[in-house]
Image (spheres, coloured by chain):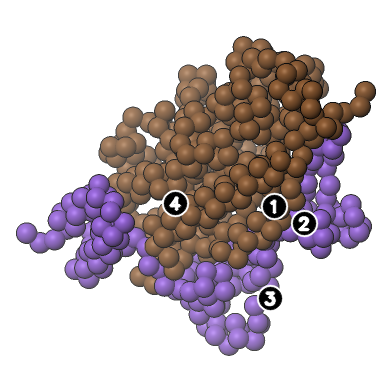
Chain colours: A purple, B brown
Amino acid sequence: MSEMVCDHCGSTDAVVHLTQIVNNEMSTYHLCEKCAAEKGLETTPEPAGVPLTDFLAQMGHEQVEEAETGGNQCSYCGLTFKQFKETGRLGCPHCYETFSYSLRRLLRRVHGGTQHVGKVYLPPDPSASEMEKRLEGLRRRLHRAIESEDFERAAELRDQIRSLEPA
Amino acid sequence: MEDFASIPDYGLSWLEASGDHADIVLSTRVRLARNLQGQAFGPRARVNDREAVLQRFRACAERCESLRAGTLLELPDAGVRTRKILLERRLVSRDLLGEEGEGPARGAAVHLSGADPLSVMVNEEDHLRVQSLVSGLRIEEAWRMVDRLDEELGRELPFAYHSEFGYLTSCPTNVGTGLRASVFMHLPGLVLTKEIGKVLQGLGQVGLTFRGLYGEGSEVVGNFFQVSNQTTLGKAEEDLVDHLDKVVRQVIQYELHARQILMRDALGVTEDKIWRAYGLLRYARSLSFEELMNLLSGVRLGVSLKLLPGLRVYTLNKMMIFTQSAHLEQAAGRDLPQTESDAHRAAYVRRVLATEGYVPADDSASGGESPDRPEG
């Protein structure tokens, strides 16, 4: 956490650091968000610099507690929801199940949704339904490649699909 | 492999200044975050977890066609300078190198593929961070490279994947695709015309974000910005990549427009800035890295505007990398205290500009009619 003083108004939350050369002299300014905005140097509304933890801390306590009864700690890695709120980092893949209720709310806020629509992973030893989902994903990408007339890509995807389809 | 001198080219293919708009877009990077099933994520992993991850990756890399020719460098075994050089080439993150004084944790490693732009960080916040770093604006191409490698890795390694949330990552801001595509841009026109605030704000509204040279939390120096996707879940990889590409091309148009305005309304001042920057670089005896970056920004603008015809973008890219402190130390063959480092930096720049950057004295171009020639 930086504790930089804003060069303009003196508040202690300078988040924008600007280095410029004026009349051949280099100077660095540290500005708080408000003063930076006034100087036309606004940060994005949700800059990457805003720690996820601040965001997490704002999450309503009451809802979390009721939803997390009995599920406050990951049975696999031992991470508590409190620890997650402090660090913004989950402990292991299983945490996603343990804290799924709160995570869905968080993911909706951060990403605008919870459903992955990208690549479908095929584990080294796939089940039939995993195979089907993977094929679906590949067909979707193939369709897209053809639409954008990317035929090299399409050929590659077609090969991948063929290699998975039962002969 | 302790001696970095024997692997000097790693991570440098992007310097070549090929690819679209290479004067404005220095490089494109696409990375995928991947984790193994049944293992704690980086921040909660114990030594044996980390070693298990490294061992599985090593076995996989030996079988994997795209990785077989490369080198797996275990960071705790690497020299301090080597680690810094890797950081300066953006092949490892600060996190992977660990706290100052403590050094990298056991199991922290990076796989490098020589002249190939692909690399893999092992045991960072996520078990694997696969990245490709290419010259100019080539997001789609960089994505394909990591996608192919990801396919190969995924056939060997059981990735943590969830049917709803997608690829699972330590930080929920990376979950889903695990994809972060970033484009490293030089936007002096927008900064000088004071339009940059609006543009950066606009990025936020279309789901993109910006950072300084070394990623999250780093400062914006010398008008260089890294623009990347903010969200990773709910859109297909191709859509994320496409969207970034479109927006970046729009930003390039804004930048070009701003440069036109500078040339039209403030030619004298702009030329003066550029030539002063060039003059300082050409003759200074001591340069801090920050000062250098700011001066390079001016000179880079001059090259783009064809005001400094003898210089190539490649030379400018090279100066950004080889003037960083660990690179200077490597060249000097010893540690350099700050003041010496600044002197070595200035000497390197003078040498490069003397051999690769011949620029004829500009007395003719705008001499007679320049309205705001500095007094003196």
x, y percent for residue B115: 42, 28
Q: CA distance from mark 2 to mark 1?
A: 7 Å
Kindly identify which residue carries mark 1.
Answer: B196
Tell whether label 3 touches label 1 (CB within 8 Å).
no
Tag 2: residue type? Answer: Gly
Kindly identify which residue carries mark 4.
Answer: B32
Kindly identify which residue carries mark 3.
Answer: A58
x, y percent for residue B101: 69, 37
Tell whether label 4 touches label 2 (CB within 8 Å).
no
Residue at coordinates 54% horizontally, 46% vertically from top-left?
Answer: B183
> Same chain, marks 2 and 4?
no
Is residue A156 positioned above or below A137 on the image? above
Residue at coordinates 19% horizontally, 54% vertically from top-left?
Answer: A158
Q: Earlier in the sequence, mark 4 or mark 1?
A: 4
> Same chain, marks 1 and 3?
no
Q: CA distance from mark 4 to mark 1?
A: 29 Å
| Label 2 element class | loop
Is residue B355 positioned above or below A63 on the image? above
